[in-house]
Image (cartoon, helix red, strand yellow):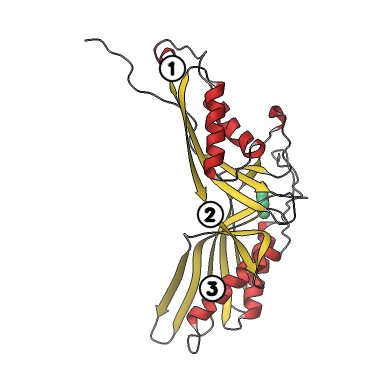
Amino acid sequence: MGIVLGPNRYGKAESRVVRIVRDTARHEIRDLNVSTALHGDFAAAHTDGDQSQVLPTDTQKNTAFAYAKKHGVASPEDYAIALGGRLLEATPAARGASVKVEEYAWDRIEVDGRGHDHSFVRRGGEVRLARVDVERDRTEVRAGLEDLVVLKSTGSEFKDFLHDEYTTLPDADDRILATALRAEWTYARVDGIDWNATYADVRAIMLATFATTHSRALQETLYAMGRAVLEAHGDIQAIAFRAPNKHHFLVDLEPFGLDNAGEVFIAADRPYGLIEATVVREGEPS
Ligand SMILES: O=c1[nH]c(=O)c2[nH]c(=O)[nH]c2[nH]1
């Protein structure tokens, strides 16, 4: 019995395409996870090592980013139709192109009852935390949250840092700042505290401070958030942050004749900067 090639397809999975529309001060964000696959007559690539009809998966990825700029992302469907059409057109051996788009939803951060122009919070996924230690002579309550994913599409820079012979990072005047925040605060006492109201207010303060603080580093943003919380809540003794810097790298679209003025980014998942800081009242043990 002979052995033959069965069904096959190939493509680039999970390109993390972030498209910012910034024609006005009120930015829009589309945050996508894009997978493409081509199927058709690609037998020779499998049986003879012949790549002449193979549009590289790298090219498919480039096209996904280029189309986020060139065609735009009015909707995942509209973008996917355009991208699939282009891939099919570029690949004579393909019978079809499949495009799968997952979209992560972002809401504007509310500041004084109004959605902020360029600061966003990802919908869903966030977890509220409470940790209580009851001892014979005292009870300690810590509260917080995890996976509060926030992003600002402008108002963030990182420059004038220390350089050595291994430093390659260029100065950034205008970058995306994003993190999946974990914050945990310690109460100074347990009596007479409205836990739900305090939780909601601390969360709102952290979000508003993230939105309105011009950031020279994630470190500065965390400190500003912690200060604002401690200033507003005398019952909170300290707050500890853990903030992975979710890097968004500007995609070079110049080879495709497209400019990219902070509009199309690749969202990297790892490695990530990890910034941890505690903000405490002077004189308190941290
Ligand atoms: O906000 C930042 N803080 C850093 O310490 C750092 N380091 C880095 O490479 N990028 C950044 N960004």
**Label 3 amino acid?**
Trp
Disc 1 target residue: 42
Question: Vertically, is 209 above or below 216?
Answer: below
Amino acid identity at mark 1: Phe
Image quarter for residue 259?
top right
| Residue at mark 2 to residue at mark 3: CA–CA distance | 28 Å
Labels 3 and 1: the sequence-earlier one: 1
Q: Residues within 10 Å of mark 3 (few under 14, many from 20)?
A: many
Decide if residue 211 is in sight here. yes
Q: Secondary structure at mark 3?
A: strand
Sort mark 2 into few (<14), some (14-19) or many (20+) by Cα contacts within 10 Å.
some
The residue singled out by tag 3 in the image is: 185
Residue at position x 77%, y 49% from top?
Answer: 173
Please state, as top left, top right, bottom left or bottom right, where the C terminus lies in the image.
bottom right
| Cα distance in 3D space between marks 1 and 2 | 36 Å
Q: The disc labelled 2 sits on which kind of residue?
A: Ala
Q: Residue at x 48, y 89 (%)?
A: 191
